[in-house]
Image: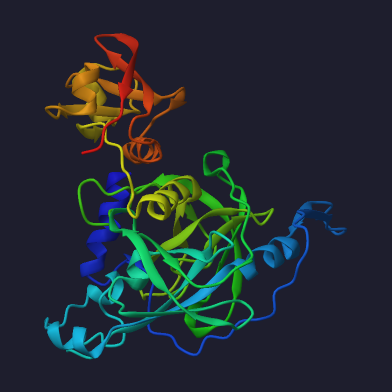
Amino acid sequence: MKRFFSLLLAGMIGGGFTFGLMHLAETNEKAQTPTSFQAVQTNFKNPATGTMAFDFKEAALRSTPSVVHIASIESKEAAMKRSQPSDPFRYFFGDGFGSPFGGNAPRQGTGSGVIYREDGYIITNNHVIEFADNIEVTLHDNRKFKATVVGTYPKSDLAVLKIDAKNLPTLEVANSDEAQIGEWVLAVGNPMNLTSTVTAGIISAKGRDINIIQGGDAIEAFIQTDAAVNPGNSGGALVDAQGRFLGINTAISTQTGFYQGYSFAIPSNIVTKIADDIIEFGAYQRAYLGVGISELDDDYAKELGLNFSQGVVVESVEDGGSAQYAGMLPKDVIVGVNGKPIKSVPELQETVGRSKVGDQIALNVYRNGKNVDVPVLLKSR
């Protein structure tokens, strides 16, 4: 798996695939009138083949009123203070709005967002609004509002906005842990200067770490889908076939800057934890294990004399951290948390990231030929 992603990332320099955060300049977005209904998944049988298929009409109607358009504008004053040379990578990664050739022109861009609470809280990607001094939100019924930033967490590329509105339509939240590979999903957003757009696909993989967010403690455990996602979809909703919120669409795999087969969404379980913390405390209250880790693979398993090759190896234990107090040791192999199997670093980071400071979790650890359960009281850093 490491080889797969390194080839794609290496190709970014030579004109091959790149993983890009999805935002390009788009303007004059318009919305449509919302419809009220009860979301139901409908199956129908193709008389020619006798096979079952899904009818996504209800899921699309349920989800589109809760997805908004976001326009982000940098002030002239901020643009004048910013002086940087042209950098082609910024066209994909967040600073290339409006002027991919560099310069000090105010940056502009658009993306999508998901109404999280009926009293005006909206979730989007941090990269959609990180440069903005002015943010305008357009609802599905064409009403426009100025938005303020409640808080952000760049290490998961999430942001929470607030508009002065009440009785807004929201989505039921699905448990992203229960989503299965092969399950149908819809991507809802405002791509390529279009109003509310819905595309369908399946979940191709879970727990993807594509190294798109900078920082060693970034939380990346993306849901990978083949639903078509394009610039402007950033911050929009990934929903299941019942129209329930499953994630925030964030990145694409591409040669051109447009969709070419795979898109990536932040799972709802980590999105809601971060958003709830930002709304309640003004910032994400992240819990840490306090360990340096690496992913177990077949070669490393042979080196360690193990007869299994999935899990997370503890390489170091931080002084004063949660793991040290719990008695964790270097070369412990974490294979489960709270009864849930852990096969990769992204799975561990997401699971711990959803926990609260002060929570006690049970790590299942392989140590000296035995499986042991280690209770860990989580601390902040």
**Residue 101 placement (x, y as % from top left):** 21, 87
Indicate left or right for 131 with 53 as reference. left
**Residue 327 placement (x, y as % from top left):** 21, 16
Q: Is the C terminus in the top left, top right, bottom left or bottom right quadrant?
A: top left
**Residue 91 placement (x, y as % from top left):** 27, 77
Could you tell me if residue 212 is visible in this image? no
Q: What is the residue that sits farthest to the right in this orientation?
A: 47
**Residue 142 placement (x, y as % from top left):** 60, 83
**Looking at the image, which is closer to me, 143 or 46?**
143
Q: In the figure, residue 318 lies in which quadrant?
A: top left
Indicate left or right for 243 with 225 as reference. right
Rendered image coloring scheme: rainbow
Could you tell me if residue 63 is visible in this image? yes
**Looking at the image, which is closer to me, 85 or 62?**
62
Q: In the figure, residue 97 lies in which quadrant?
A: bottom left
Q: Is the N terminus in the top left, top right, bottom left or bottom right quadrant?
A: top left
Residue under the image location 27 percent in, 86 percent down: 75
Q: Is residue 238 above or below residue 379?
A: below
Count of marks overlaid on the render: 0
Residue under the image location 25 percent in, 67 percent down: 12
Residue under the image location 22 percent in, 60 percent down: 10
Indicate left or right for 192 with 306 as reference. right
